[in-house]
Image: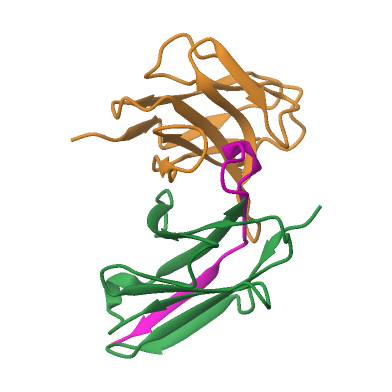
Amino acid sequence: DGGITQSPKYLFRKEGQNVTLSCEQNLNHDAMYWYRQDPGQGLRLIYYSQIVNDFQKGDIAEGYSVSREKKESFPLTVTSAQKNPTAFYLCASSIETRNSPLHFGNGTRLTVT
Amino acid sequence: GESVGLHLPTLSVQEGDNSIINCAYSNSASDYFIWYKQESGKGPQFIIDIRSNMDKRQGQRVTVLLNKTVKHLSLQIAATQPGDSAVYFCAEKDYGGSQGNLIFGKGTKLSVKP
């Protein structure tokens, strides 16, 4: 079955450590996205990528980094510079970058203590 | 900046009744709207979308209505079932614009009583 796989589902880290969240898709979608979801707030865009080896900052990119070396993969690194890293992180993809719906993974819940 | 909002944060309905979830938008440039359903602990799932050249679009048990005059969007779910219990988000953007411009509302929680 085609879909988006995020791993792990739960992740715990100590403050000051970098952590990388995995996102893999087998939908052959060109575009991929990372969102952050906090209680009572709408999804906020961190980074997105329209093609391999290219990506753009979203609204809240500070403290995060990404890479897009392969079409299928778009890992997100939460660095120690991110002031409030504890959140639910959602990866998504879409066929193209304009008007096709986003397909989401089931998220990674990151807790930093 | 302008953002999408929702009239009610929670909605409780009886199983079998119809549900109506509302969404207000303020960006007059938005002309593409999407509804998502998010179950607890899962990612959002696409339900239906609509462009501003339409005022109604139907899917399986769902209908989206768009009123551009008052900048209002609604999602109607017919014969609501327990499996419909979830948080529902609307999202907006300008059609043809970058997906990076997609703005999500905060969500309405739908609870279905048996």
Front residue of B37 and B71:
B71
Residue A66 visible in rendering: no
How far across and how far down the image is residue A53, in percent? 53, 9
Give the residues drawn in magenta, as a range. B94-114
Q: Position of residue A113 (x, y in %)?
A: 66, 35
State the orange chain.
A
Instruction: Classify A53 as above or below B29.
Output: above
Position of A75 relative to A4 (above/below): above
Indicate the quadrant containing the C terminus of chain B: top left, top right, bottom left or bottom right. Answer: bottom left
Q: Residue at x 64, y 61 (%)?
A: A40
Decide if residue B75 is on the left or right side of residue B106. left
Q: Specify whether residue B79 is in view.
A: yes
| Residue extending furthest toward the right | B1
Q: Position of residue B107 (x, y in %)?
A: 56, 65
Residue name at image x 61 percent, y 36 percent: B98
The structure residue drawn at horizontal position 60% and vertical position 41%, both measured from the top left corner, is A36
**Tally of marks:** 0
Chain letter, colour green in render: B
> Seen in the image, is B19 located left or right of residue B83?
right
Q: Quadrant of residue B80?
A: bottom left
In the image, residue B107 lies in the stretch drawn in magenta: yes
